[in-house]
Amino acid sequence: MKYSIEQVLTVLSEVKDPESGKDLVSLNAINSLVIEENKISFSLDLPENNPSIKKIEENCIAIINEKLSKDVKVEIKPFKKIEVKKISFGRTDDQKILPGVKNILAVASGKGGVGKSTVSTNLAIALAKMGAKVGLLDADVYGPSIPKMLGVEGKTPSIKKVNGKDVIVPIEAQGIKMLSIGFFVKPEDALIWRGAMATSAINQFVKDTDWGELDYFVIDLPPGTGDIHLTIVQAMPVTAAVIVSTPQQVALADALRGVSMFRAEKIEVPVIGFIENMSWFTPEELPNNKYYIFGKDGLKDLANRMEIPLLGQIPLVQSIREAGDEGKPVSLNENTPMGKAFNDLAKRVADGIEERNAKLDPTKKVEIDPNASCSA
């Protein structure tokens, strides 16, 4: 009998790591899970100096044989972390702002409701699972949803002194560092701020936060084009941008405006690709069926016309929404189709940044007259 991934993970969730007191599934320690007729193999992503590894392996084998079948052969392979290749700098290295950050990636959308924050969160986690050091800034000031998606809603970042100055320490969750205005306001409260107040908060999150060394600093921008976008490109040298959209014609028109903003003469941030979200709907009970409820290949066609790479197409499936609501994004589990989709997307984004760095000069901060407006 061949068991499902859910069945195996449910059984393994009963095995705890004595060092942390948490179960293996909550720790995202089960990797490279392969299920065959009479064999289950996987690896354990646990610290090498964990003194309980041998006992944990024995417990995994015992509980699978007890709960599933004593005839199932269990093979636990050594864990090999995927190491990213040497990551180049996509920005000038003489910057005083974020000196330890190699690449700054802006994730934008022309309009709201296209799943930009979901893509940003899963992309950041997938990059980290590749072996990169990743930070995630929730710059969507008026709709901060990332704390909930990462399961850290209600937490408060700590403050520490650096050279006599108070700096914010980012929250660490699911293998990444992250910060959001959502940590400083109640979930039920509306943030009624003028633009200057919002941009001041973003500047503090960038300049007065100890982000440390990062390979990728992912910024989840608000929908549209406005104050926050200008604040970001003025505060730091943004390496590249990606645009998230659905295939819907209304969304595509706004995605085009997003590209125009980054390509504007005074901004000139390279757009390395599009990400099409909600490309089709696939019911859980009919995994091979595709229903193009927002139109088919809309962003793919736009990408071809603009000669901008389409980095990925993410379907509309219930598991992505459920995982975000539960604070356990689908990219945490590379054994699922959605986890694989985001992992593939992360590799394309990383390759796109490396190609951009090889062909273009490092970026610099944008100098814009605060009283002037930009148009493309």
Image (cartoon, grey):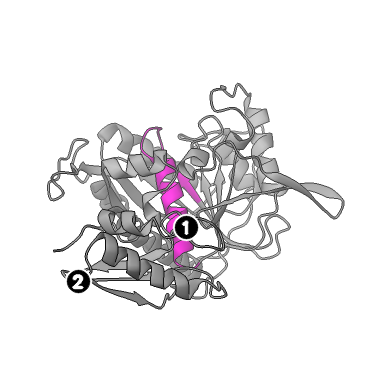
Comparing 143 with 244, the one in front is: 143
Is disc 2 placed on a helix, strand or loop? Answer: loop
Q: Is residue 133 above or below residue 325?
A: below
Q: Residue at x 31, y 38 (%)?
A: 252
Q: Position of residue 341 (x, y in %)?
A: 30, 56
**Magenta stretch contains residue 112:** yes
Real-space CA distance between mark 2 and mark 1, rounded to the nearest whole angstrom: 27 Å
Comparing 313 with 306, the one in front is: 313
Inspect this view and state whether residue 376 appears. Answer: no
From which residue to which does the magenta span run?
106-131
Q: Is residue 139 left or right of residue 342?
A: right
**Magenta stretch contains residue 20:** no
Q: Which residue is disc 2 drawn over?
A: 71
Q: To which quarter of the image does residue 201 belong?
A: top right
Crowding at label 2, few (<14), some or many (≥20) Cα neighbours within 10 Å? few
Inspect this view and state whether residue 160 appears. Answer: yes
Comparing 174 with 275, the one in front is: 174
Q: Is residue 370 above or below residue 357?
A: above
Q: Position of residue 205 (x, y in %)?
A: 66, 44
Q: Is residue 282 left or right of residue 14?
A: left
Q: Position of residue 212 (x, y in %)?
A: 67, 60
Comparing 219 with 271, the one in front is: 219
Q: Is residue 172 above or below residue 348?
A: above
Is disc 1 placed on a helix, strand or loop? Answer: loop
Amino acid identity at mark 2: Asp
Q: Residue at x 54, y 29 (%)?
A: 142
Q: Which residue is disc 1 drawn over?
A: 27
Amino acid identity at mark 1: Leu
